[in-house]
Image (cartoon, rainbow, N blue to C red):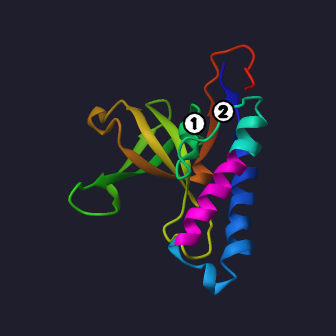
Amino acid sequence: MNRNCTDLFLHYREIARLVWNLGFWPHPELREFESVGFYQKTVSRLFEAMVIRTLGYGNTIEDDFCPGKSMEFDVESTHPELQLLVAAEFPDRPGTIWGKPTLRVCAGTFQLRFLAFFDWDQLSVRDFRFVEVLIERLNDHPALTGRRALVEVDQCSFWLVDDEETPAAN
C-alpha cells in the first residue's frame, strides 16, 4: 500500500529553503558554486533524516543532487490536470532546457518519480516552486519515458511506494 508523505515533503522543502536562504545566501562570499555543493550535501542528509528515517527506513542518499533516487516516491496530481515541463537534454551542450515539450496530462495517465525540489537559479534566494521528476510512464507520450520534467509543487502530492508491510531499518 502506498503511503502519503506530502506533509513530510513539504516540511523538508521548507527547511531546505531556510538552510540556503538564511544560512548561505545572506553571505556574499557563500554565493558561489562551491557552496552549492556543500548545500546539496547538507540538504540530502536532511532528506535522509527528515523523510526517509521518519518513515522508518535506514536507506542512505545515493545522489546528493537527486535525493529522491534513494527510494521510490511517486508524485501524484492534486488537480484533474498536471502541467509537465519536460527536459530537452542535448549531449553536446551543457545544461538542460525545460519545457521542450510542455504538456498537460490528466491525473491517472502517468507515473512520475520524485527526484528533488528545483529552482532555476542555484545562487539566488530559493523558493523550490518546482519538483523535478522522472517520467516512468506517460500514457499519451510513451517516447518521453525516462526523461525528466518539472511540476509545480502546489499541483502535486508525494507518495512512498510501499510494497512491504513493515519497513526494515538499517
Which residue is the site of mark 1?
Answer: 70
Relative to residue 89, is residue 4 drawn left or right?
A: right
In the rendered image, residue 64, in percent from the top left (x then y), is placed at 56, 50
Could you say which is closer to the camera, residue 72 or residue 77?
72
Horizontal and vertical percent for residue 110? 44, 33
Q: Residues within 10 Å of mark 2 (few under 14, many from 20)?
A: some
- Asked whether residue 58 is drawn in magenta, I would say no
Residue at disc 1, secondary structure: helix
The region drawn magenta spans 34-47
Amino acid, disc 2: Asn
User: In this orientation, which residue lies closer to the viewer: 18 or 4?
Assistant: 18
Report which quarter residue 162 is drawn in.
Answer: top right
Asked if one can make out residue 137 in the rendered structure from this viewpoint, the answer is yes
The residue depicted at 20 percent of the width and 59 percent of the height is 92
Instruction: Residue 40: say if magenta.
Output: yes
Instruction: State the quadrant of the N terminus.
Output: top right
- SS of the residue at dot 2? loop
